[in-house]
Image (cartoon, grey):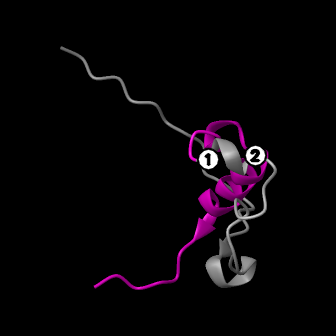
Amino acid sequence: MSSQFVIYPPIRNVKYRFDFDIGYLSKSPCKECAHRKDFPGCEDDCQILDKIHTVLSEVVSCSRRG
């Protein structure tokens, strides 16, 4: 039985963004959304939430967990 490993090249020129660099949400974008009547079933098609999730997925958290 042989094992196959994938060797990835090293990542270069990575610019890390930290949670304190991007800020925070002061209120939910859903509060004044035109599609509020469809809530909570509208989150899969929401472009604003998709952009927020994309930004947050690329951020390094600086909070300490106990």
**Residue placed most toward the observer, 38 or 8:** 38
x, y (%) of residue 16?
Answer: 68, 70
Residue 40 at x, y = what percent?
56, 46
Q: Residue furthest top?
A: 1
- Residue at left 64%, top 60%? 58
Q: Do the residues labelled 2 and 1 touch (CB within 8 Å)?
A: yes
**Residue 55 located left or right of residue 60:** right
Where is residue 53? Give x, y as percent. Answer: 64, 55
Specify the quadrant of the image occupied by residue 9. top right
Magenta-tinted stretch: 40-66
Give the image location of residue 55, x and y in percent. 70, 60
Which residue is at the front of the view, 23 or 36?
A: 36
Q: Residue furthest left?
A: 1
Judging by the rendered image, the residue that carries numbered circle 2 is 35
Q: Distance between the residues labelled 2 and 1?
A: 7 Å
Q: What residue type is labelled 2?
A: His
Q: How many labels does the image show?
A: 2
* Residue position marked by numbered label 1 in the rendering: 39
Label 1 environment density (alpha carbons within 10 Å; few <14, some 14–19, many ≥20): few
Which image quarter is the C terminus in? Answer: bottom left
